[in-house]
Image: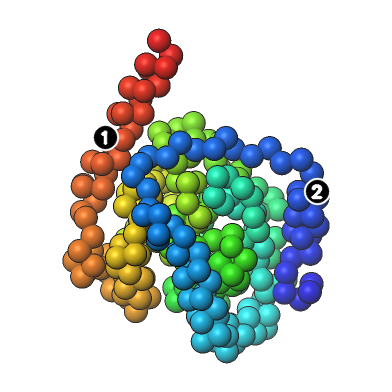
Amino acid sequence: MSLFVDPEHLLRETRHETAPKVGLPPPAPPAPAAPRWYAAAKPVLDFLLALALLILTGPLLLFAMLLVKLTSPGPVIYAQTRLGRNGKPFTIYKLRSMTYNCESLTGAQWSTPGDSRVTTIGRWLRKTHLDELPQLWNVLKGDMSLIGPRPERPEFVPQLEAAIPLYRERLLVRPGVTGFAQIQLPADSDMDSVRIKLAYDLYYVRNIGLFFDIKIYFGTFAKVIGLPFHVILGLCGFPTRSAVDGEYQKLSALAEQAERGTAS
């Protein structure tokens, strides 16, 4: 197993799982939520689609794992703790795209454009999104959905909660391999990019449904083949960034009013 997964991380995960968990308080829903029938059907659809994708992409995944193993020292699979639905920690799996143990000196930090920690093969894996394929196993386990907000690292969440209104509400649904925000926005690089992505995440939480998910699946395919964000927006009929951000501003204002009313 040490050929594929970081054994030190698994040891830390074992200690974490056996220690008392101090989770986040349950988030308050920014209703409306998903239709009841789809909320029940979505996990089943996720499992069946993830299983089919894992079978279809299995040979490609094995090829990518071989490339990682031959081109850089360290485990092939990168295991990392993330927060799932209602703030429950889980272990996410990805193909390792950075040099092994690269955060041992710097601690947890976001990746930035041109990040020197990314390996040559890792750049290709990230560009093609092949590094995300092991997360299909997370979907089969029930930790993740195929579509939802990206799961955040617990090291960053307290700071983000304190700085960005309604941040915790993105934890109402299972995190996703892909999602409404991921197919239209670049990866998080600073606090402002997180706030913008949160607006998209909350829009998804409030509008989740079968038709919306189908459009996101189509948008994901469009992104994988290289179509730009503005083209994806037009093809899928997604709302504009100003509309998504405007809805978030209204939610933030309502939350602030409620908080002031509670305080008084």
Q: Is mark 2 on a helix, strand or loop?
A: helix
Q: Residue 18 carries which label?
A: 2
Q: Is residue 24 above or below residue 59?
A: above
Quarter of the rendering occupied by the C terminus? top left
Where is residue 163, by image quadrant? top left
Where is residue 141, by image quadrant? bottom right
Q: Is residue 61 above or below residue 148?
A: below
Q: Residue 250 carries which label?
A: 1
Q: What residue type is labelled 1?
A: Lys
Quarter of the rendering occupied by the N terminus? bottom right
255 or 246: which is nearer to us? 255
Colour convention of the picture: rainbow
124 or 61: which is nearer to us? 61
Q: Which amino acid does label 2 sit on?
A: Thr
Q: Where is residue 16 in the image (x, y as percent from the top left)?
A: 76, 48
Badge 2 or badge 1: first in the primary sequence: 2
